Amino acid sequence: MVEEEGGGGGGREGGRGAPLPPLPTMAGRGGGETGEQVYKIALYVKAGSDGESLGNCPFSQRLFMILWLKGVVFNVTTVDLKRKPADLQALAPGTNPPFVTFNGELKVDVNLIEEFLEEKLTPPRYPRLAPRHKESHTAGIDVFAKFSAYIKNPRKDTNEALEKALLRSLRRLDDFLRTPLSEEIDADDAGDLPESRRRFLDGPELTLADCNLLPKLHILKVVARKYRSLEIPADMTGVWRYLDNASQRTEFTSTCPAEREVEIAYLDVAKRIQ
């Protein structure tokens, strides 16, 4: 188990083994520097194969990204599911990470935690992360389910159909990312619509929708390549632009497990085609 302090400034707490990535400093947005309300927040995430580093869990990364983007001070603890400490067993009996404690109150449902943080951590001190566009909420909504069906399938006679279903789902996401949002369209321009160049699902900044989708897309990219020799097609320029932009944001890269951790997690999940 490794515990670190993240969010708006402050030091790093101890814990054995490899440290988690450096966490951001955001003066005036957390830690009580301005004399405003101070929240005591702890995030518990799945540990990797060494029991200490970040493990493969898109839900853990989703909450990690949200808290980081909010700019609030929070502690991060990686939990080794094989050797869950007694104090955590007592804190959240029968519950695996991710979960959060907020001022001592345990919260275990990822969707409800997201809603709670968005309602509790509000402007002007903390940014709103909800997407402005309704369609951003559902973009890529079925990609991970199609991927899971594809990667877990061992049957040669159904592999091609499942692969095509996955690629169709990715194509729909690509179409969405290449289609301009309303603010990208010039109402006075009578010509063809330009291709969108936005960085993320809802515009130039990361939102809750990205915190949900990006961890899953990363897993898909790594696992499909490793166990099926399948790459996201190069002509899906919207998806690749999206992934490239995410790779430039610390909120994504420093909350993301190493590719090796993702591969290990799927070693027995990805079925050999027979």
Image (cartoon, rainbow, N blue to C red):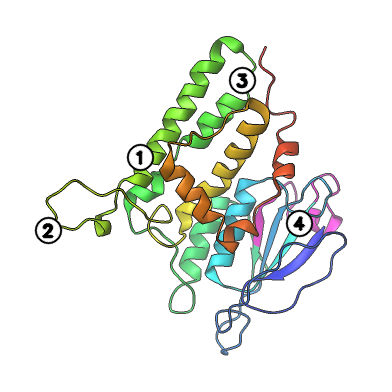
Observer-nearest of 229 and 106: 229
Observer-nearest of 37 and 133: 133
Q: Earlier in the sequence, mark 4 or mark 1?
A: 4
What residue sits right under mark 3 in the picture? 153
Magenta stretch, residue numbers: 80-100
For discs 4 and 3, the disc positioned in front in the rendered view: 3
Give the SS element for disc 4.
strand
Q: CA distance from mark 4 to mark 1?
A: 37 Å
Q: CA distance from mark 1 to mark 2?
A: 24 Å
Residue at horizontal 26%, vertical 59%? Answer: 183
Q: Earlier in the sequence, mark 4 or mark 3?
A: 4
Observer-nearest of 231 and 46: 231
Check residue 78 in the rendering and tell me which mark sits there, or answer none.
4
263 left or right of 169 in image? right
Q: CA distance from mark 4 to mark 3?
A: 31 Å
The image position of residue 177, as x and y in percent, is 38, 46
Q: Is residue 87 magenta?
A: yes
What residue sits right under mark 2 in the picture? 188
Q: CA distance from mark 3 to mark 1?
A: 27 Å
Secondary structure character of the magenta stretch overall:
loop
Residue at horizontal 87%, vertical 59%? Answer: 17
Q: CA distance from mark 2 to mark 4?
A: 53 Å
For discs 2 and 3, the disc positioned in front in the rendered view: 2
Q: Amino acid at mark 1?
A: Asp
The image position of residue 209, as x and y in percent, is 45, 52
Check residue 175 in the rendering and tell me which mark sits there, or answer none.
1
